[in-house]
Amino acid sequence: MISRSGSNIQGKGDGTMRSRESRVACLFVLGVLWLANTAAAGSAGQRQSRSTVDDIVTIANVQAMIDEMLTGRRTRTLIPPLTHTYGSFSLGEAYRIQGALARRLTRDSGSVAGYKVAYASKAAQEQFGIPAPASGPLFQLQRIPSGSVLEASEFTALIIETEVAFTIGKKIDQPISSIEALKPHVKWVHASFDIGSERFDSRQAKPVVADQVANGVGAYIFVLGPAMAPSEVDVDALTLRLGVNGRTVAESAATNVMGSPWNSLLWLANQVVDRGDALEPGYVVQTGTAAPAYKAEGSKMLGSYLGDCGPLGKVICAIR
């Protein structure tokens, strides 16, 4: 444009004026194009941001939440519910916060080793005031052998449940439509303990499902009993019992878990796939308690614990 302006048969001052006008026009056009592209990118970025970060849950807040949850775990102290401190957020956001927390936890707890299903029975939902099942990750270093002795100082408050657990044999990375289609993906079935630790101080405000999900639904330690092939045991016929110091404190049919522990596994598998993840071979899935969880604090945590699943076997541990 400058060369064309310079070749115009005009006076020097007029040529300079035309050159300036041409540059201004060019810059104006470029500016309009830049603004249009910026607006489009900003709109797309805003849509992406809103799908990732809730209006209330800013990136800074998420980082603060994770730091607070990690501090609570490290110091074994209860923290206020996140929704009380930072404002309410959606269940979808809660799972994204859980994912960010899990990435931090892998530094100390090892890689993800499976998932637990929480609030899988009406009894558990009523006990915790949570209306539907939820899930959280398990980590390699959270698994301990049956017969282990734990220190009471590890817990803020004990939550323990006898459950049916499955070990995945074949990767699940696509939706599964039925239990019949699910069973070939399962290698082993176990009696198990889900041993959780209370995370929230409910004196100021009661934690809601978003709080529990964000903090991993209380997952802390899991214990597996002997492995059995799925074809060798009818899990729907099992009765799940929890004994403390020789006294039965919980007993319920396995079918109280979403109608069948298999239904719980199916729900979890499809939920994980829907989030863009997969159940890998070797992953453990704890399917949830059929009865209200046993909760204890202080010296009441001490003792011997027995999880009895009849023909599926037993699992034991002690807290000193």
Image (tube, helix red, strand yellow):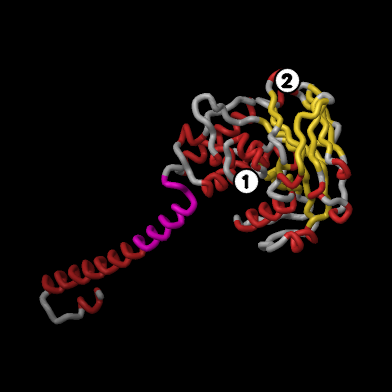
Q: Residues within 10 Å of mark 1 (few under 14, many from 20)?
A: some
Percent of width and height locating residue 159: 69, 31
Residue, x 44% and y 52% (percent of image)?
50
What residue would you read off at disc 1?
133
User: Disc 2 versus disc 1: distance between alpha carbons?
Assistant: 28 Å
**Region of the chain picked out in magenta, as a range:** 38-55
Q: Amino acid at mark 2?
A: Lys
Residue 287, magenta (yes or no): no
Q: Main secondary structure of the magenta part?
A: helix
Residue, x 49% and y 46% (percent of image)?
90
State which quadrant residue 131 falls in: top right
Q: Nearer the viewer, residue 125 or 81?
A: 125
Percent of width and height locating residue 181: 75, 63
Q: Amino acid at mark 1?
A: Pro
Residue 39, magenta (yes or no): yes
Identify the element where label 1 is drawn: loop
Vertically, is 131 above or below 280?
above
Residue, x 47% and y 48% (percent of image)?
53
Q: Nearer the viewer, residue 255 or 111?
A: 255
Number of on-image labels: 2
For marks 2 and 1, the one nearer the N-term is 1
49 to the left or right of 26: right
Vertically, is 48 above or below 256?
below
Q: Nearer the viewer, residue 175 or 36?
A: 175
For the C terminus, the image quarter is top right
171 to the left or right of 2: right
State which quadrant residue 179 falls in: bottom right
Which mark is drawn over residue 115? Answer: none
> Quick check: can you spot residue 113?
no
What residue would you read off at disc 2?
300
Percent of width and height locating residue 218: 65, 36
For the N terminus, the image quarter is bottom left
